[in-house]
Image (cartoon, grey):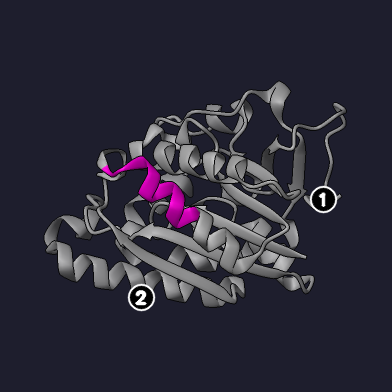
């Protein structure tokens, strides 16, 4: 089976569903990643000291490092303007995503939920574009929104997060066996180390916080309320 993740920035995949991506890659599934910007407008830590061109080049290399660790075979990095996706022509964004879906031909697609985890406008824009691209297609294709639960959000007191509605969660993936890869991928993103310092301070430790990754299946809509443990089931 083939799984494609689509996000706005380098590091979204690692702080996001990296455990799920690593798990399915380790099981022999083909995993792809599309990132729409190079993160040149980043404002964490050392990013403040680097010009946009240098920062973009550095974050691309960080993303390639993370992709190698997660065993991602298909990696596409686009150059849409960071922090300005909502200002781009909507049809162009949807066309780009539709083209990537056609090229990779996945069985399932992952992106952030509609509130973008952190509320970042780029995250929310990509979520909207992906949904619209999926709705253009007539073939059977699963779309999952990735997010954190209200319980997880409650443990992060020094960063604003927007959880998914607990009652809408349809899939819960156990990523304990690949958490080391997720953490290693996170460490590739050295320009984002300030975020890691926040996450490693969560109560009971990051490993407990990140043991499970949660998803809402939004296409096709599920017909039951059973929480599943496999995206392809």
Residue 91 included in the magenta stretch of the image = yes
Residue 148 included in the magenta stretch of the image = no
Residue 230's disc is 1
Tally the numbered discs: 2
Whether residue 4 is visible to the viewer of this picture, yes or no, is yes
Task: Where is residue 138? Give x, y as percent.
Answer: 69, 46
Depth order, front residue of 96/230: 96
Residue 61's disc is 2
Q: Is residue 63 left or right of residue 113?
A: left
Majority secondary structure of the magenta segment? helix
Q: Is residue 85 left or right of residue 52?
A: right
Mark 1 residue crowding within 10 angstroms, few (<14) / some (14–19) / many (20+) = few
Q: Residue at x 72, y 55 (%)?
A: 175
Which badge, 1 or 2, comes first in the chain's sequence?
Answer: 2
Screen quadrant of the N terminus:
bottom right
Task: Where is residue 158? Give x, y as percent.
Answer: 38, 33
Q: Residue at x 45, y 47 (%)?
A: 94
Compared to residue 5, the image places residue 132 above or below, namely above
Under circle 2, the secondary element is helix
Task: Where is residue 189? Give x, y as percent.
Answer: 39, 65
Q: Residue at x 55, y 36 (%)?
A: 113
Q: Residue at x 54, y 45 (%)?
A: 133
Task: Where is residue 81? Give x, y as percent.
Answer: 25, 53
Query: Marks 1/2: CA distance?
Result: 31 Å
Q: Quadrant of residue 55?
A: bottom left
Q: Which residues are magenta?
A: 88-97
Q: Quadrant of residue 153?
A: top right
Residue 141's disc is none
């Amino acid at each position: 089976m083939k799984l494609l993740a689509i996000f706005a920035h380098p590091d979204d995949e690692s702080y996001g569903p990296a455990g799920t991506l690593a798990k399915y890659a380790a099981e022999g599934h083909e995993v792809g990643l599309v990132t729409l910007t190079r993160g040149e407008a980043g404002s964490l830590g050392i990013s403040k000291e680097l010009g946009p061109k240098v920062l973009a080049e550095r974050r691309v290399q960080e993303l390639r490092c993370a992709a190698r660790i997660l065993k991602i075979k298909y990696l596409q990095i686009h150059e849409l303007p960071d922090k300005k996706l909502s200002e781009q022509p909507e049809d162009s964004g949807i066309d780009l995503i539709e083209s990537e879906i056609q090229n990779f031909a996945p069985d399932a697609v992952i992106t952030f939920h509609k509130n973008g985890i952190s509320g970042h406008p780029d995250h929310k824009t990509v979520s909207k574009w992906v949904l619209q691209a999926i709705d253009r297609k007539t073939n059977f294709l699963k779309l999952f929104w990735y997010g954190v639960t209200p319980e997880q959000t409650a443990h992060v007191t020094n960063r604003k997060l927007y959880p998914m509605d607990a009652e809408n969660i349809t899939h819960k993936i156990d990523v304990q066996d690949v958490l080391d890869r997720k953490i290693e991928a996170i460490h590739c993103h050295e320009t984002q180390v300030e975020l890691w310092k926040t996450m490693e301070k969560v109560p009971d430790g990051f490993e407990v916080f990140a043991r499970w990754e949660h998803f809402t299946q939004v296409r096709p809509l599920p017909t039951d309320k059973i929480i599943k443990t496999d995206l392809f089931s």
